[in-house]
Structure formats: C-alpha cells, structure tokens
Image: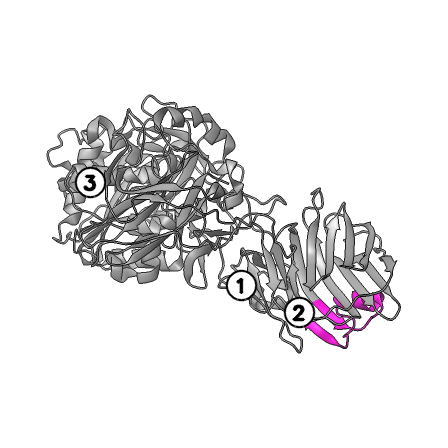
C-alpha cells in the first residue's frame, strides 16, 4: 500500500458543485494537502517544464489521516442464509489456477460459532465443518486442469457424517471421469441463521480463480450421486432451500436466489459475467440468445471494482475558478501523490468557444497498467527530475488495466475509476525516451502540452471529459465552436462516439490530435461510466483476446471489439484510422502538394515554409519527432471522405513498425511499406459549415513545445485552431479534388 494516495468521486466538476476526495494514508498518519491548477505536467527540464498555479482553498493544509482498506478479489456475499442441520449442497466449478499454492475458497458459511467452508487446495477439493465441539474435515482426489467439475457436500445429522464428492465433466477423447468420495464422521452441530460468501472467505481472503455455476442447497441428506447427476440436468431435486441461477441479473451486481426464502446476494469487485458455462454448446455466440449456456461467473483474486473508501475531503469549487485541469497534491513524511480532476465552466461555452476533450475513458481503461521493464528503466530519471516515482507494477493491489491478464491468463475486461490509478497523474513520466529532448510522457501528462500551448498563446479554452460527453451527449459539444482531443482517444462508448459524429455532421469543427483513436468499443456499467467493460472480439492490436463465445458485453448484450468491425471505422469519423504501431520513436512530416490547395489557405497564413516537400516536426518530446509510436492513415475504402486532403505524410523508419492486425488477410503485407505504415495529416469540410483536422499520430503533440512553441508545427496548429474557432462557415468544396489513391511527396 502506498504511503498516501486517493481518488475522486468524478472526473469533472463545475463551480458551485462539490467534489469528494477518497484518501488513504498508510498507518493513518497525518498528511498535507494543497491544490493547484495544472498547465504542463511534464517534469522534463529540457521541455517546457512542469508548470502549475496554486489555487488556495479551504482544504489546503494539514489533515488527520486514515488508512482505508484495499480488498481486491471478486466474490459474492449472501448476507443472510439460514440452514438446517442436515443439508445437501451442490455446485459446478471450473478452476483456472489450480497451480496456485494458496487455498481458494468456493463457499464459506458462518452462523454464530459454526462455520462451513468448501475450498480447493493442492489440486484437491476440501471441506470443513467447525464448531466449538470440534471440526469435521474431508478431501477428495486430485482435480485435473482444464475442465468443469461437479461438486457435492452432504451434512447428514442423523448419521453424524459429512460427505464430500466431486466428478469432473467428460473431456473430448478422454475416459469417463470417476467420482471421488470422502467422508468424515462426527456430530453435526446445529446451523441456523448465518451468512455466506462465494469465491472467498467471509473476511474477504483466500479468493477463488475460476468459474462457479448454479450453487444450490437442499434440505435433508441426499445421496451424492443424485446431487452430481442433477448438475447435468438429469434429475430435479426436492427440498430446495436456496438456488442461485447466475443467468438472472447478468450485467448487474446482483445474484438471485430462486428458492422459497429469497436469500439474494451481491457481487463485490465486478467479476466477469456472460461467460461460457458448463453446458455451452458453441452454437451460440451471443449470450442473450441462449442465456442458460452462460450461467457462470468468472471470479479472480485481483479483480477491483469500487474500493468503497470513505470521503476524506470535500471541496465546493469557487465560482471564480476557470475551467482547466487541477490536481490535489498529497504528501506525508514517507511519500507523495496527486489526484487530478477537471473543473468545467458553470455554463459550457461561456468562458471559451474552444474545448479540450480529455480522453478520460481511455485513461480509465489503461489505469494501473503494470509495465515493469518500461517503468523501471525510467525510474532514475524520474527521481532526478523530481517526478512521481511510484508505479502500477509496484502496487497491483489497486487493480489492473484492461491491457493486463489475471494470474490465470484471462484478460481484464472491466476497469473502474473508483480506485487510485497511479499512472494517470501529473508530474509523471512513463518510460525512458532516449531521444535528445525526450520526456517519456503518455496519457494525461502528455495531453497537458495542449493546455500549456493554449495558455501561452492566449487562446481561451475550456476542458471537458469523455465522461461528460457520455452523460450529456452532443448537446454539450454543440456549446463550442471547436473541440480538440488529446493524444490517445482510443476507447469510446456508443454515446461518446455518436455524440462526436453528430457534432461533426451538424457543422462542428473537430481536431483529432492523436493516434490510434476511436479504435475499441466499451460499454458502461448500467449506464454509469465509473466502470466500463471491454470485450476484445476478433481483430485488432491487443494483449489478450476474448474467449470463444464471449465477444458480447455482459453489461448490455452488445457485440464488442473494434469500431471498424462494427461498421464504424475511424476513417469514417475523422478521416484517418489506425495503421501501424512501433517503438516509442517518431519521425518528421513532409508537406504534400495538397498544402497548396486554396481550401486550406488559412493554414499557410504567414508560413512561407508551408510548401510541398518541406519537413516539420523534426524534433519532439515523445520519441524525437511528430509522426510515431501509434499512427493513422487515410483510406477511402474505410470511409475517408472523397474530398479529404492529405496535406502532410509521416513515414516511420524504425523496423518495429508493422501493419495493424486487422489490415492483414494473410501473412503478406497489404501493400508496400509506404502504403501502409504512414501517418496522414488530413483535412476535410463537413456539412453545415464544419470541418475536421486530424493528425493521426500519438507523438504529434509532443512536438508542439519545441523551441518554446516557436516552431513550424506549432505555428501551423495555431493558424488551424484560430480558423476553427472562428464561427464563419467553411464553404462546401463543390469542385474538391478527390483523395488520390496514394499521396505523392514532392
């Protein structure tokens, strides 16, 4: 656990509204807080330099600390479950981490001083019934990897016996599995009123990794053979006391008891639902078509949803505070951290006609992304620059990103903002950039180059977030003349992507200033974006792929994956789409002949150098240039408008750059290197007098600050933004030349 850390209850807040900070200090030691407005979050002394302005307020100063619990691991709590003396319990499980040396709890019930626990340990199934009079224990034979197992536990009060049995389900081409049975004899204590946890102990430890399906409890002692047969649907058993069918409530945190007493439960830490169950046939890929085949829940020992910390500080934003990025800085004698958030304008568009749309959904999906080799390489530089040094790989207790896999190899599908995200801070670098001026910034820290540039150039700007656009839709965007993005707006909901499309179609001016944008679809949890779900179905650059039959989101039943696979490629939205990814390296751009087109004369204003064949963006703080790392190209076959102009092209030279997976049908490249591995700076007009400008490079904004923002790329961008902020309509290009198949460089 970190010496001091925390999170906020929302990404953005307006003047007059309160924002709450959930803070934990190790050992409950006191801490000091101060609040600042952030202009540049890059600590690189060779760049523009870290820059903030103090914002004195009522929460500045010392505070008493409290250590708040971190309890990772998903589980299901049934707060009340009354049991009789004799009972029969059955469930189906699929362990996915049998190699773990730690016990993995399947079920834990406690009533008073009596406890019943079922768990896996050393590849065997164990049961224990304990009371002040003693304990009955039993264990079965070995459980093999790879398949489903039916388990049964019987407490026979009359015979004074605990019976435990398990039988694996048949695997293809394998002998019929044997039932293994174990018994322990002794008196069965009275049970009575109690509570139960599935997939962990009641003190929230010893978590299970794997899938559980249809736990059921029956009154009376039934033969274990009948219980196990019932798991395959061959019999219907009498005396149901409780039966939790996980088909009900997929997409929620609820588990429903279909027994007569309504012993319902709640999930904790958002385990994965809508996963293939024990009877999945392979005939259905969409869980809503055959929900009975998706009757299991996948639990992991390191799932993290809502940490549930208590509010430590609350701040009502003063009415005079301008819109911008802010951070609460926290410090103890042992460490420091900061918690960034956005202050919006009280009335959108009242402070400025331009809005910077921070990609907070992408921040959230990437939140807590352990990359030890990358972050360790930059550690000494971070210390030398006075930057934050704590990294996600050192603190997995706060959960993982959707780029990670759990210990059992399954991908992380759900990410939450109700937890600290140590790699989404200010005064932070993320990797060692070995180019002469390299900073190694990413995500939020990189996006502040735009705030710094706008402030230094005196261009008024408000800041909004993806979370705001999801909640308020296109109506929010339409309060602005121009909207610009950060460097990596990769993840979008139907609502955010749809709002941007409607804004452009309605005459808005949109500047896409990043790379690999509008790539993956995500779905919010019950409409609320504090948690989002990602299913990496089919193609795409990815660190894990959805399991067979699991390409549809649990949260809403919709298909997941690339927007391109869903018929909405990025090219059809902003003119360019993902083309290639390589090392953290970048090259300059060169203007094409299109820079001379009369339609973009406003870009060339005062820039004699803006001519065919001239290069720009030769230096940068993110890989040494402007075109690099993750890049996008124009492609008419994927929706780039026919009248779009490609006014500059960047061609990465490093051999690590390869075509995107979704572009390949065979092992062959889908064209020459220059056809495919390229970043196209693109412009086109839209209906209603609007326009779109796209750069298609994650490194682009890192070239803005070079020479104190006095460089050709920065001056070009200022011309473009000032014209986009001017409400004068862009004329529709009646005689526009079509996008050529391949731009030529002069």
Q: Residues within 10 Å of mark 2 (few under 14, many from 20)?
A: many
Location of mark 3 (residue): 454
3 and 2 marks in contact (CB < 8 Å) = no
Element class at badge 1: loop
For the record, the magenta segment spans: 216-243
**Viewer-proximal residue among 719 and 107:** 107
Instruction: Please tell me how crowded label 1 is: few (under 14), some (14-19), or many (20+) other residues with Cα within 10 Å.
Output: some
Q: Which residue is mark 2?
A: 81
Choose the circle earlier in sequence order: 1 or 2: 2
Q: Is residue 399 left or right of residue 506?
A: right
Viewer-proximal residue, 586 or 3?
A: 3
Which of the 4 image quarters holds residue 473?
bottom left
Give the spatial CA distance, label 3 vs label 2: 60 Å
Using residue 556 as the reference point, say whether residue 463 is left or right of it.
Answer: left
Residue 626 vs residue 303: left or right? left
Distance of label 1 from label 2 (alpha carbons):
18 Å
Which percent across, then down, holds residue 21? 37, 51
Q: Is residue 174 left or right of residue 390?
A: right
Q: Secondary structure at mark 2?
A: loop
Q: Is residue 490 visible?
A: yes
Most foreground residue, 632 or 497: 497
How many numbered circles are shown? 3
């Amino acid at each position: 656990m970190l010496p001091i850390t925390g999170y906020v209850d929302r990404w953005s807040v307006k003047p007059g509204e309160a924002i709450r900070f959930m803070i934990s200090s190790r050992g409950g030691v006191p801490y000091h807080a101060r609040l600042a407005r952030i202009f540049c979050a890059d600590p690189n002394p060779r760049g523009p330099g870290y820059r903030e302005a103090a914002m004195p307020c009522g929460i500045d100063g010392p505070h008493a600390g409290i250590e708040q619990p971190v309890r990772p691991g998903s589980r299901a709590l049934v707060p009340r479950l009354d049991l009789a003396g004799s009972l029969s319990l059955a469930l189906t499980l699929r362990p996915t981490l049998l190699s773990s040396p730690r016990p993995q709890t399947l079920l834990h019930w406690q009533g008073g001083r009596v406890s019943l626990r079922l768990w896996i340990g050393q590849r065997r199934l164990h049961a224990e019934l304990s009371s002040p009079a003693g304990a009955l224990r039993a264990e079965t034979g070995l459980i093999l990897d790879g398949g489903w197992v039916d388990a049964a536990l019987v407490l026979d009060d009359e015979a004074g016996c605990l019976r435990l049995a398990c039988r694996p389900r048949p695997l293809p081409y394998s002998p019929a599995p044997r039932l293994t049975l174990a018994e322990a004899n002794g008196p069965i204590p009275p049970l009575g009123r109690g509570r139960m946890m599935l997939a962990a102990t009641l003190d929230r430890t010893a978590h299970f990794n794997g899938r559980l399906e249809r736990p059921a409890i029956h009154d009376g002692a039934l033969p274990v053979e009948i219980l196990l047969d019932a798991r395959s649907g061959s019999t219907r058993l009498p005396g149901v006391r409780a039966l939790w069918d996980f088909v009900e409530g997929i997409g929620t945190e609820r588990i429903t008891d279909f027994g007569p007493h309504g012993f319902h439960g709640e999930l904790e830490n958002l385990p994965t639902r809508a996963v293939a169950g024990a009877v999945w046939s392979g005939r259905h890929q969409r869980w809503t078509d055959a929900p009975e085949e998706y009757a299991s829940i996948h639990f992991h020992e390191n799932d993290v949803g809502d940490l549930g910390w208590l509010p430590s500080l609350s701040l009502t934003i003063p009415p005079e505070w301008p819109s911008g990025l802010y951070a609460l800085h926290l410090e103890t004698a042992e460490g420091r951290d900061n918690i960034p958030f956005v202050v919006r304008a009280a009335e959108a568009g009242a402070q400025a006609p331009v809005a910077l749309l921070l990609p907070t959904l992408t921040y959230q999906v990437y939140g807590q992304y352990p990359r030890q080799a990358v972050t360790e390489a930059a550690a000494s530089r971070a210390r030398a620059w006075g930057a934050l040094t704590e990294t996600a790989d050192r603190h997995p207790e706060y959960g993982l990103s959707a780029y990670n896999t759990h210990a059992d190899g399954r991908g992380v599908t759900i990410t939450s903002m109700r937890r600290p995200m140590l790699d989404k801070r200010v005064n932070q670098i993320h990797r060692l950039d070995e180019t002469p001026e390299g900073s190694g910034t990413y995500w939020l820290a990189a996006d502040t180059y735009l705030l710094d540039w706008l402030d230094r150039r005196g261009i008024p700007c408000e800041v909004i977030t993806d979370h705001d656009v999801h909640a308020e839709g296109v109506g929010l965007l339409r309060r602005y003349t121009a909207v610009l993005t950060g460097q990596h707006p990769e993840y979008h909901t139907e609502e955010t992507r749809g709002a941007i499309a409607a804004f452009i179609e309605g005459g808005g001016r949109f500047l896409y200033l990043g790379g690999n944008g509008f790539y993956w679809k995500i779905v919010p949890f019950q409409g609320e974006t504090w948690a989002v779900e990602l299913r990496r179905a089919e193609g795409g650059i990815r660190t894990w792929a959805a399991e067979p039959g699991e390409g549809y989101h649990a949260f809403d039943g919709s298909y997941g994956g690339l927007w391109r696979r869903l018929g909405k490629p990025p090219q059809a939205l902003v003119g360019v789409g993902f083309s290639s990814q390589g090392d953290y390296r970048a090259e300059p751009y060169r203007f094409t002949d299109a820079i001379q087109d009369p339609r973009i004369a406003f870009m060339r204003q005062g820039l004699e150098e803006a001519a065919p064949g001239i290069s720009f963006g030769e230096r940068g703080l993110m890989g040494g240039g402007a075109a690099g790392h993750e890049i996008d190209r124009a492609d008419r076959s994927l929706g780039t408008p026919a009248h779009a102009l490609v006014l500059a092209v960047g061609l990465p030279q490093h051999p690590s750059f390869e075509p995107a997976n979704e572009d390949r049908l065979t092992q062959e490249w889908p064209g020459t290197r220059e056809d495919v591995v390229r970043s196209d700076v693109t412009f086109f007009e839209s209906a209603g007098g609007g326009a779109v400008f796209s750069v298609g490079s994650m490194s682009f904004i890192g070239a803005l600050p070079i020479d104190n923002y006095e460089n050709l790329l920065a001056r070009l961008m200022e011309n473009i933004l000032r014209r986009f902020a001017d409400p004068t309509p862009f004329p529709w290009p009646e005689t526009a030349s079509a996008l050529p198949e391949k731009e030529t460089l002069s």
